[in-house]
Amino acid sequence: MTEPTLFEKIIAREIPADIVFEDKLCIAFRDIAPQAPLHVLLCPKVPLKMLSEAVDGDGKLLAHLLLTAPRVARLLGYTEGFRLVVNNGSDAGQTVFHLHLHILAGRTFDWPPG
Ligand code: AMP
């Protein structure tokens, strides 16, 4: 059996986190090293490693995550725009191998991203 990831431990309440939203399918908590005034990680509760491992059967879950992200931003008072980031794989900067959407808001963002 593989060792549970950090985010599985947060979902199981084995590690503390500042949880800002939760429903049956997903959980959102503040990033420990925020890159913007709002920096929340939105994760499915099932341990999907990364976006590229998703299959057709994950479609509803992925749609749910995309629909939930603006709700979380709004819930926390950020109505003027936000950026979603998914780092897929270590070359893209993924460090925790449990799919998560970074929800960033509260400042302007450069393009192209670094
Ligand atoms: P990524 O690099 O896309 O895999 O994102 C992982 C994110 O998890 C980084 O932004 C980290 O700052 C964040 N992180 C690491 N440990 C924790 C933790 N214990 N609680 C909340 N966020 C964390």
Image (spheres, helix red, strand yellow):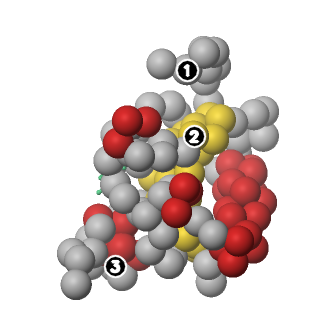
Quick one: SS at disc 2? strand
Instruction: Please tell me in which quadrant of the rendered image residue 104 appears.
Output: top right
- The residue at 48%/19% (across/down) is 114
| Residue 106 in the image: above or below residue 9 | above
Q: CA distance from mark 2 to mark 1?
A: 10 Å
- Is 23 on the left or on the right of 114, as rendered? right
Q: CA distance from mark 3 to mark 1?
A: 33 Å
Task: State yes or no: Cβ of the residue under disc 3 lies below 8 Å from any atom of ligand 1.
Answer: no
- The residue at 75%/51% (across/down) is 70
Q: Tell us which disc is closer to us: 3 or 1.
A: 1
Report which residue position mark 1 lands on: 113
Q: Tell us which disc is closer to us: 2 or 3.
A: 2
Q: Earlier in the sequence, mark 3 or mark 1?
A: 3
Q: Amino acid at mark 3?
A: Arg
Does the rendering let one see residue 81? yes
Quick one: SS at disc 3? loop
Instruction: Using a 10 Å C-alpha cutoff, classify the residue at mark 3 as few (fewer than 14 neighbours), some (14 to 19) or many (20 or more).
Output: few
Report which residue position mark 3 lands on: 13
Quick one: SS at disc 1? loop
Q: Amino acid at mark 1?
A: Pro
Q: Are marks 2 and 1 in contact (CB under 8 Å)?
A: yes
- The residue at 32%/47% (across/down) is 95
Foreground residue among 10 and 38? 10
Q: Amino acid at mark 2?
A: Val
Report which residue position mark 2 lands on: 85
Residue 25 spot, x, y in % from top left: 62, 78
- The residue at 35%/42% (across/down) is 90
Foreground residue among 65 and 30? 65
